[in-house]
Image: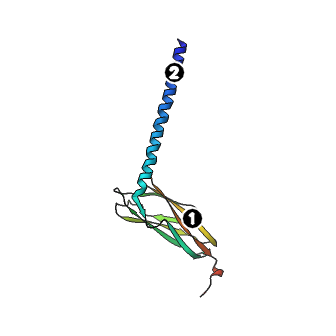
Amino acid sequence: MKFKLLFTMCLISIFSVSVFSQTKGLKNEKQTRQITENNNNISWESKTYDFKTLKQNKPARAEFVFKNTGREPISITKVKSSCGCTVTGYDKTPVLPGKESKITATYNSRKAGPFRKTISVFMSDNSQFRLTIKGTVVANDQIKKK
């Protein structure tokens, strides 16, 4: 009698674990599919901005323009730069279908030399984008006067 009870309990435990693990897998698959499908709702003019050459200690600003090509309003939930030398700005109001908005990135050119920084953009439809700014900062004493 005890053996049957123990055997039944083991079967129930195994069944419960397998059911819960399958449910979690389906949920993650659905979320992944949603993120992939929603990436088509945004069209960028460019995801890279090349400053070419910047003067040292002169902040430089880049603009990244995007268009909502989807059928629903979309908004930016968060913008994060890869370092403290880049300050970002964006409009927090939803972007209606067919309308454009922009993200600004201001780079503080204190350090001379080449640079490449990334900006991560998180949207309300769970899509994510990576923008890039790059260039070379030239020290003020190295600038040639023409």
Instruction: Kindly give the residue lying farthest to the top in the view shown.
Output: 1
Relative placement, left or right, of 73 versus 108 is left
Residue 80 % position (x, y): 52, 59
Q: Quadrant of residue 51?
A: bottom right
Residue wearing tag 2? 9
Residue type, mark 2 in image: Met
Residue 87 % position (x, y): 53, 65
Alpha carbons under labels 1 and 2: distance apart: 56 Å
Residue 141 % position (x, y): 66, 81
Please tell me which residue is depicted at 60% across the width and 68% down the height of the picture. Answer: 115
Residue 59 % position (x, y): 55, 73
Relative placement, left or right, of 68 versus 136 is left
Assign the C terminus to one quadrant of the image: bottom right
Specify few, some or many for label 2: CA neighbours under 10 Å numbering under 14, 14-19, or 20 or more. few
Residue wearing tag 1? 117
Q: Quadrant of residue 113?
A: bottom right
Q: In this rendering, does residue 58 appear at all?
A: no
Please tell me which residue is depicted at 41% across the width and 52% down the height of the picture. Answer: 37
* In contact (CB < 8 Å): disc 1 and disc 2: no
Compared to residue 37, the image places residue 22 above or below, namely above
Element at label 1: strand
